[in-house]
């Protein structure tokens, strides 16, 4: 599994860094009020994609690798048709949402719908490349999109700083990447009825769960704009997009290459347990220090990536959103696997609904009094409860969750990293913000990596010795 990780992780890391830069560019050119409106429009696009499109990708990942060779072309063809049908349906969904929130105009609708189409097709094509193990194409396409989104956003917003310009830059980067990725399948083949029924039984709960999940994770922007004001919504959305986006990509660095490997051994319970334990260990080894490190460097992150307009944001909002993002992703990329592996995904919408109800009730209580801080607190509490409920329900249904491998070593290494950053802060206080952030990140990475090497987590010294022997033979 470690080889799969290193095949995809570098380009995923670059993609994560590009998101930092993208948000920094957008917040530099757009005012908090404009960014708040952009965030609301993006909620409509991401909402439609999470509900109507993402379940298709989930089915592709879950079933393609385990399908027989003669069934794979039909399976890909069927998922492609589902993608097209749902893209057509999503136009009505987006128009309806915009009408309800009084944001409808043909220009805004066209821009958001074009973004949905381009991003959905792009995400589907790179998932196809990944499950077909076309590693070179996957790397090339993801790298190109990450470069394009930074360049086009800077050039277009520098030319004309407007919400539609920001959306157009995103659309352009996705469409060019789609051309590079290409499509190698057919759309005329059909799955046999029993297989189609099995896939739909697996995927439809993802659709319902996607609807509830997007309401739980994105409705906070709309609620802040409605119950507080658009400027607070912009400040809140900038922090939320930065943290939720980055944490999602940190988790995806592990999940994208390794989850398909888990689906190949679902019938061997002991092997699945061992590989899921390793997967969970790697997931925690990346996500836990990332979350802690981001919180320790919160003021520097805001200063460097969001600019002066966002300095008024209370850092407690930053901390709460960072841990909200961790709970959301540890549930989606580890705890919910229990339902997927035992084909009990029908329970996932119920758990997501409980999370949504908790978040909405708390939001209506806390936002009028505390504003954006209340929204962040509501999200943190709701996602924590959701993660605990997933763990308990998955265990009750019969899945044996493994304790992530080397979890104790990860906690020790994270503590050493935190101490190193605290000590280093006093020595870099006089540097300019960018240099200070880079130095502190370097200190954190070196201390964390060094601690794992000393503790020999994941037999890292053995892997290093094997690599040296191979190099010596060459």
Image: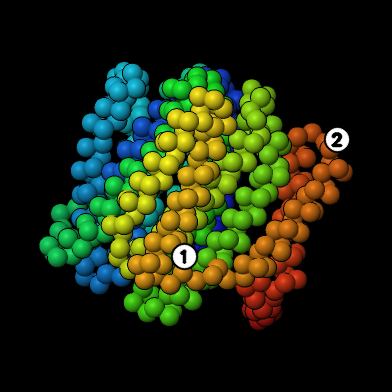
* Residue 73 x/y as whole percent: 23, 62
Q: Which residue is mark 1?
A: 258
Q: Nearer the viewer, residue 390 or 81?
A: 390
Res 171 → quadrant:
top left
Q: Is residue 90 visible?
A: yes
Find residue 430 and name its label.
2
Query: Residue 470 placed where, x, y %?
Result: 64, 78
Position of 165 relative to 469 (above/below): above
Residue drawn at (63%, 28%) of the image:
313
Q: Residues within 10 Å of mark 1 (few under 14, many from 20)?
A: many
Residue 336 disc label:
none
What is the CA distance from the residue labelled 2 to the residue labelled 1? 42 Å
**Residue 441 horizontal side relative to residue 75, left or right:** right
Residue 335: image location, x then y, percent: 45, 60
Which residue is painted at 53% across and 43% down in the image? Answer: 380
Indicate which disc, 2 or 1, sits on the residue closer to the N terminus.
1
The structure residue drawn at horizontal position 62% and vertical position 50%, both measured from the top left corner, is 291
Q: Could you tell whether 275 is left or right of 123 in the image? A: right
Could you tell me which residue is drawn at 38 percent across and 38 percent down? 215
Count of numbered tags: 2
Question: Is there any visible trace of residue 183 in the rendered image?
Answer: no
SS at mark 2 in the image = loop
Which quarter shows the C terminus?
Answer: bottom right
Position above or below: 304 against 165: below
Vertical side of 366 occupied by 252: above or below = below
> Label 2 crowding class (10 Å Cα cut-off): few <14, some 14-19, many 20+?
few
């Amino acid at each position: 599994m470690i080889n799969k990780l290193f095949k995809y992780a570098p380009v995923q890391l670059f993609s994560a860094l590009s998101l930092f830069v993208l948000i920094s560019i957008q917040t530099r050119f757009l005012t908090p009020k404009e960014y708040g409106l952009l965030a609301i429009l993006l909620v409509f696009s991401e909402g439609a994609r999470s509900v109507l499109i993402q379940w298709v990708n989930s089915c592709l990942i879950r079933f393609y690798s385990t399908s027989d060779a003669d069934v794979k072309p039909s399976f890909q063809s069927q998922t492609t048709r589902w993608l097209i049908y749902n893209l057509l349906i999503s136009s009505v969904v987006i128009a309806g949402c915009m009408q309800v929130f009084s944001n409808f105009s043909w220009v805004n609708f066209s821009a958001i719908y074009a973004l949905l189409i381009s991003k959905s097709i792009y995400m589907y094509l790179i998932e196809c490349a990944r499950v077909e193990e076309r590693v070179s194409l996957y790397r090339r396409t993801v790298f190109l999109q990450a470069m394009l989104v930074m360049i086009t956003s800077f050039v277009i917003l520098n030319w004309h700083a407007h919400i539609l310009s920001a959306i157009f830059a995103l659309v352009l980067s996705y469409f060019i990447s789609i051309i590079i990725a290409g499509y190698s399948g057919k759309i005329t083949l059909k799955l046999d009825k029993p297989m189609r029924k099995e896939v739909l039984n697996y995927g439809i709960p993802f659709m319902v769960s996607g609807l509830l999940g997007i309401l739980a994770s994105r409705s906070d922007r709309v609620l802040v704009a409605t119950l507080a004001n658009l400027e607070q919504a912009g400040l809140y959305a900038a922090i939320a997009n930065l943290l939720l986006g980055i944490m999602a990509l940190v988790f995806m660095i592990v999940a994208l290459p390794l989850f398909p490997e888990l689906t190949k051994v679902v019938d061997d319970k002991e092997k699945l347990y061992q590989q899921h334990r390793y997967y969970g260990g790697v997931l925690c080894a990346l996500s836990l220090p990332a979350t802690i490190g981001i919180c320790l460097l919160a003021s520097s992150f805001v200063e460097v990536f969001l600019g002066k307009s966002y300095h008024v944001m209370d850092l407690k909002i930053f901390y709460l959103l960072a841990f909200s993002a961790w709970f959301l992703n540890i549930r989606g990329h580890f705890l919910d696997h229990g339902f997927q592996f035992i084909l009990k995904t029908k329970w996932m919408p119920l758990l997501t609904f409980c999370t949504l109800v908790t978040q909405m009730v708390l939001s209506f209580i806390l936002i009028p009094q505390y504003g954006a801080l209340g929204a962040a607190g509501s999200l943190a509490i709701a996602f924590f409860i959701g993660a605990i409920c997933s763990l308990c329900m998955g265990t009750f249904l019969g899945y044996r969750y493994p304790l992530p491998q080397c979890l104790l070593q990860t906690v020790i290494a994270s503590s050493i990293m935190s101490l190193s950053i605290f000590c280093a802060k006093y020595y870099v206080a006089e540097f300019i913000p960018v240099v200070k952030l880079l130095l502190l990140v370097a200190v954190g990475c070196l201390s964390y990596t060094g601690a794992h090497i000393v503790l020999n987590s994941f037999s890292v010294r053995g892997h290093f010795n094997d690599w040296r022997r191979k190099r010596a033979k060459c």
